[in-house]
Image: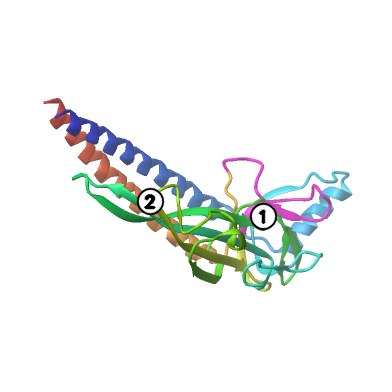
């Protein structure tokens, strides 16, 4: 019965985690509801008003901005794997391999596993353009929601010195066989319409929207609209809340059974 009690405690903990995720999703959705969607020209006007009053570099405003992605003044980026012109990219390299293991009967079997050996995101800022102006975007290492996948390629075989140098030979570490590498890439192209919720500031002079100083305020960059994001968050909130409740109730029942 001790095992039943332990499983029950684990389920209660998972239920509590579900409730926590529901609350975080709720807070994210409410932040989108509460924030104003402002044209860039209006934000620039607020900044100039403060500057005229002698406050330079002190403008702060948490809000939403919607517009088209525009390259950094140094020019657009090139995605490393595909060469696609973009303002932001993420690339991953995942090593796929199989390894030997003993099952519960003591027999040798093989199973496939994956190991991420590279997960790299561009750090260069870009801009957002609407009908009234332009504002910088500081991605701060945050990956956009729903970027475009432009490349995915599995290269079979063992990556030796010419294939990345991660492993040598077809087998490594005794009974483990290299199967190949999967190369994947996502981008935000110039002109892609983006929704951004963050903090607009003028610390470096021109207006920039980026991650808020307050950790309680979310930073969202998405190719989806605000309406799509709020609808998705509402669905996720219900799923986490209901799922967490069901798992927690089951866990409590098992704990009680285990204690009897």
Q: Nearer the viewer, residue 57 or 142?
A: 142
Q: Is residue 37 above or below residue 13?
A: below
Q: Is residue 123 visible?
A: yes
> Does residue 86 appear left or right of residue 167 in this picture?
right
Q: Quadrant of the C terminus?
A: top left
Residue 79, magenta (yes or no): no
Q: CA distance from mark 2 to mark 1?
A: 43 Å
In the picture, the disc for residue 120 is none
- For disc 2, the neighbor class at 10 Å (few under 14, some 14 to 19, many from 20) is few
Residue at label 2?
A: 175
| Residue 237 percent across, percent down from the top left | 39, 51
| Residue 69 percent across, percent down from the top left | 68, 68
Q: Secondary structure at mark 2?
A: loop
Q: Is residue 10 above or below residue 53?
A: above
Q: Secondary structure at mark 1?
A: loop
Q: Quadrant of the N terminus?
A: top left
How many numbered tags mark residues here? 2
| Residue 52 percent across, percent down from the top left | 88, 50
Quarter location, residue 164: bottom right
In the picture, the disc for residue 139 is 1
Front label number (2 vs 1): 2
> Does residue 87 appear left or right of residue 115 in this picture?
right
Which stretch appears magenta?
196-216
- For disc 1, the neighbor class at 10 Å (few under 14, some 14 to 19, many from 20) is many
> Does residue 14 appear left or right of residue 131 in this picture?
left
Q: Is residue 96 above or below residue 22?
A: below
Mark positioned earlier in the residue sequence (2 or 1): 1
Q: Nearer the viewer, residue 23 or 61?
A: 23
| Residue at the spot 54% in from the left edge and 65% down from the top edge | 183
| Residue at the spot 79% in from the left edge and 50% down from the top edge | 202
Q: Is residue 36 visible?
A: no
């Amino acid at each position: 019965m001790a095992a039943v009690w332990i499983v029950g405690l684990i389920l209660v903990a998972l239920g509590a985690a579900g409730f926590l995720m529901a609350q975080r999703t709720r807070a994210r959705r409410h932040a989108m509801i509460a924030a104003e969607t402002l044209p860039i020209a209006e934000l620039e006007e607020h900044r100039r008003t403060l500057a005229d009053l002698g406050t330079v570099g002190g403008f702060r405003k948490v809000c939403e901005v919607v517009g088209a992605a525009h390259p950094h003044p140094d020019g657009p980026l090139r995605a490393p794997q595909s060469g696609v012109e973009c303002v932001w990219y993420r690339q991953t390299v995942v090593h796929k391999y199989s390894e030997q293991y003993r099952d519960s009967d003591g027999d040798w079997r093989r199973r496939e596993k994956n190991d991420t050996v590279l997960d790299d995101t561009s750090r260069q800022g870009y801009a957002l353009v609407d009908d009234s102006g332009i504002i910088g975007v500081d991605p701060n290492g945050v990956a956009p929601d729903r970027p475009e996948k432009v490349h995915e390629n599995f290269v079979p075989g063992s990556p030796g010195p010419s294939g990345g140098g991660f492993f040598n030979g077809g087998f490594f570490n005794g009974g483990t066989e290299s199967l190949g590498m999967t190369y994947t890439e996502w981008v935000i192209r110039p002109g892609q319409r983006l929704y951004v919720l963050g903090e607009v500031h003028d610390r470096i002079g021109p207006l920039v929207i980026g991650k808020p100083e307050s950790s309680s305020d979310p930073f969202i960059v998405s190719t989806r609209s605000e309406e799509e994001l709020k609808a998705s968050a509402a669905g996720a909130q219900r799923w986490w809340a209901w799922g967490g409740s069901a798992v927690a109730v089951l866990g409590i029942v098992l704990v009680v059974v285990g204690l009897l």
